[in-house]
Amino acid sequence: MTNPEMDAQVHFTDIKKHFNSYTLTSRMNWVLATYEGIALMILYFKLRSTKAPTVKAT
Amino acid sequence: MNENLFASFAAPSMMGLPIVVLIVMFPSVLFPTPSRLINNRLISIQQWLIQLTSKQMLAIHNQKGRTWALMLMSLILFIGSTNLLGLLPHSFTPTTQLSMNLGMAIPLWAGTVITGFRYKTKVSLAHFLPQGTPLPLIPMLVVIETISLLIQPMALAVRLTANITAGHLLIHLIGGATLALINISVTTAFITFIILILLTILEFAVALIQAYVFTLLVSLYLHDNT
């Protein structure tokens, strides 16, 4: 379960300071990053399908 | 036979007019408004029951959660009384309709989730990732937790619908079997009748338990978000 005291106890450096699975803020960051990643993937595949070249009639 | 089995779940109408609204409103008639400091026996018993239930249910909640007391008590009274009235022969049970249960589950669940996101955004978002999750599992777990959150109102509604519908169907089937067996074998018909009585007692319990489970789960979702 959530433990707000963990935020003061753990000391991460670099990117792990904002993206670890212990502190509240970093868990939120991971969740938001996952949602953004999924949104980007959907956008990419949608744009790719609209840009697909039409088949020429022979 | 098939048509008769599901005929009791069809929306009732009288002379072409739908009376389902009247049926849904009827249980409120059984709970008179207390008009005196010391009321009659019926109201006193109902007040005692409501106090007993609300004390137990609201014990886990903080000040914010307790603002939902009226909503939760109305919910359990409505579902409990509707389920019990549905056990009367030839009556229509609104809680067998998925539309009705979705109409209860989705707004209540959405209310708790929106409350959580509005007042505790960081904690609500962080809930989607359990603490201490290994790095490779994080994206998958976020997706799984999101799906499990979105499934909650569906599960609430379908649980109530399925339990009440299944119970009524069983009573209908076993009752029909008892009647059919009377001409064939009285002993077997008697045994089936005993099973029917036991099933009816079970359905009384299920009616109350399902009302309690529905309300308790809404209360737990609220507790997670307040």
Image: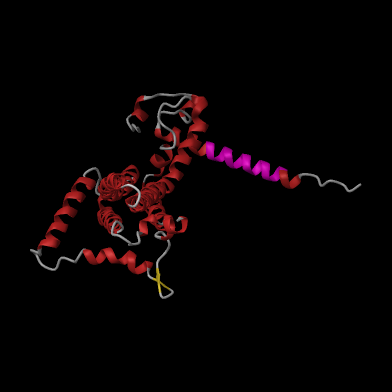
Q: Residue furthest bottom?
A: B15
Residue B77 x/y as whole percent: 26, 56
Whether residue B81 sits left or right of residue A41 in the image: it is left
* Residue closest to the eye, B198 or B143: B198
Q: Residue furthest right?
A: A58
Question: Is B158 in the magenta?
Answer: no
* Residue closest to the eye, B23 or B222: B23
Type of secondary structure dominating the magenta stretch: helix
Residue B205 x/y as whole percent: 26, 47
Task: Please provide the residue range marked out in magenta.
Answer: A34-48
Q: Is residue B77 visible?
A: yes
* Residue closest to the eye, A31 or B100: B100
Q: Quadrant of the C terminus of chain B?
A: top left
Whether residue B107 sits left or right of residue B66 in the image: it is right
Q: Is residue B99 visible?
A: no
Residue at left offset 23%, top offset 46%: B57
Residue B30 x/y as whole percent: 22, 64
Whether residue A39 sits left or right of residue A22 in the image: it is right
Q: Residue furthest left?
A: B38
The colour scheme used here is secondary structure
Q: How many marks?
A: 0
Question: Is A38 in the magenta?
Answer: yes
